[in-house]
Amino acid sequence: MGIEIERRFLVTGEAWRGGVTEACRLDQGYLAREDRVTVRVRVAGAAAKLTIKGPGGLVRPEFEYPVPLQDAEAMLATLCGGRRVAKTRHLVPHGGLTWEVDVFEGPLAGLVIAEVELPAADHPLALPAWAGREVTDDARYSNAVLASLDAPPRG
């Protein structure tokens, strides 16, 4: 079974930008969200994936499958409605791990979230200075919830 072990943080300041090694624009939409299970389609450059995520916070089931780009674009256009997120993902190495700093666009402009996948739930994590409040267990900051918002969450 696929497992995702991930922590998420709001980002403070711009210091993370100096460590960026790569960036890619992502367009993703949610085909289904029910009982804390989500089905997402994502286009990243010329690649596309269908992802199914189960309930959980730090640790949760995750299954990813490549899909033809043309099919993914059609799903985004016809099946996702207003449940979409556009963002640029920046890769920032820190503390032996690669952090993904997402800069959101459109109605979520101004929101910046960093996430880091861990090899184990108890893996020690050296937080960069720009990692602010942890939102791993705050459902308001899940991409599935953000995809339906007209503005970033407050608080």
Image: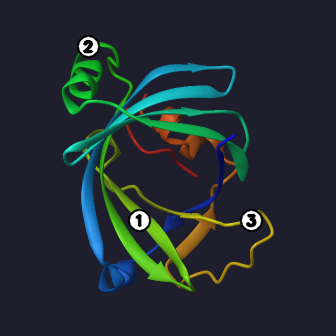
Q: Three-letter amino acid code at disc 3?
A: Ala
Viewed as shown, does residue 56 lie left or right of 28?
right
What distance separates the C-alpha of mark 2 from that of mark 3? 37 Å
Q: Three-letter amino acid code at disc 2?
A: Thr
Badges 2 and 3: C-beta atoms under 8 Å apart? no
Viewed as shown, does residue 151 lie left or right of 121?
left
Viewed as shown, does residue 48 lie left or right of 149?
left
Q: Position of residue 91 (x, y in %)?
A: 37, 70
User: For mark 2, what is the residue?
Assistant: 78
Residue count near mark 3 (Cα–Cα under 10 Å), binned few <14, some 14–19, many ≥20: few
Q: Position of residue 72 (x, y in %)?
A: 28, 27
Image-quadrant location for residue 120: bottom right
Q: Please state, as top left, top right, bottom left or bottom right, where the N terminus lies in the image.
A: top right
Residue count near mark 1 (Cα–Cα under 10 Å), binned few <14, some 14–19, many ≥20: many
User: For mark 1, what is the residue?
Assistant: 101
For label 3, the SS is loop
Q: Three-letter amino acid code at disc 1?
A: Val
Q: Position of residue 103 (x, y in %)?
A: 33, 58
Indicate which disc, 2 or 3, sits on the residue closer to the N terminus. Answer: 2
Front label number (2 vs 3)? 3
Disc assigned to residue 120: 3
Outermost residue toward the right in this view: 122
For label 1, the SS is strand
Outermost residue toward the top in this view: 78
Residue count near mark 2 (Cα–Cα under 10 Å), binned few <14, some 14–19, many ≥20: few
For label 2, the SS is helix
Residues 153 and 46: in front is 46
